[in-house]
Amino acid sequence: MKVTMRFDKKLGVILSLGAASMALAACSETYDGETASVDYAEAEAAAPTSIIAAEEAGADQAASDAAVGDEAAPVPALETPGLLPKIAYTYRYGFSLPGEKIVPLQQRHADMCEAKGAGACRILSMQGANVADGIGSGRLELAIRSDIARGFGSELSGAATESEAESTKVAINGEDLSKQMVDTEARLRARTVLRDRLLETLRTRRGTVAELVEAERGVAQVNEEIDQARSWLTEMRGRVAFSRMTLDYESSTPVGGNFSKPIGEAFGNVGGIMGTVIAWLMMLGAVVLPIGMLIWLAMRINSWAIGRREAPAAAEA
């Protein structure tokens, strides 16, 4: 009986210990489950925040890389040909050389211009040397493409130096036509738009007869203004594209001697001098003769009056 009771007590203790162990295990599992669920919930709540932060960081990095790339890349130059000044240049060169060498040098300069071609250089006028009065002179006017005008002037000066010519004048002048060209282009565009509107009115036949007649007159006037503006614009563009170059030649010493020159001038002026003297005599006669006649007549009348007063006195004596 005692043994049975002891066994029963041991069994009860074992069962109680097993129950307690199971309870503790259940509690541990419950606690671990709650902890896991809390950690998972916190992970889910933290996930969007981390994603947003990563997107922002990536955006910031991309912006930083783009900024660095922009700084490293060279900035392209702005090519704005419409804003470049439109300047019409004129060049003047003067050369002094012996009179007999003026014509050859002038011919050489003209040949140099023609060698450039009509698209680069054109002869506008050429005046041959004049040595009749003992002084040689000449002039050559050219139209030279603006981008080569300066260099071509140097070539002409070099050719003159080879002909023993001395440079006496070098001048470069420029006229800014930018504003005039912009204004003319704006006026041309405005007149073109106005013409199109007037033509549209005529095409659709909208309006009264008087309005249509006025529109026809307006079209004719606007077309005239458009043609004039185009002509001005073409002329200014030509002046900008081609510079005007003037070459003057003069002799360093008179071609003839100083002894014959005054005599020739005197013989040449004899006719003019004689004509001037005769003209002065005619004017003097036209003025002096009438005045002289009046003075002589007055003196004769005065003498006659005095004689008549003195005649009775002499008779009484």
Image (cartoon, grey):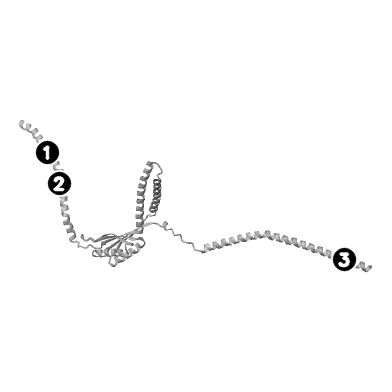
Residue 169: percent from the left, percent from the top? 31, 61
Label ID, residue 258: none
Secondary structure of the residue carrying tag 1 is helix
The residue under the point 16% across, 48% down is 279
Position of the C terminus by quadrant: top left
Q: Label 1 to label 3, Cα distance in Å?
A: 192 Å
- Amino acid carrying label 1: it is Leu
Residue at x 17% of width, y 61% of height: 260
The image quarter in which residue 79 lies: bottom left
Image quadrant holding the N terminus, namely bottom right
User: Identity of the amino acid at label 2?
Assistant: Met
Quadrant housing residue 90: bottom left
Residue type of the residue flagged with mark 3 = Val
Query: How far is mark 3 from mark 2, CA to CA?
Result: 177 Å
In whole angstroms, how far apart are the C-alphas of marks 1 and 2?
A: 23 Å
Residue occupied by mark 1: 297
Q: Is residue 174 visible?
A: no
Residue occupied by mark 3: 13
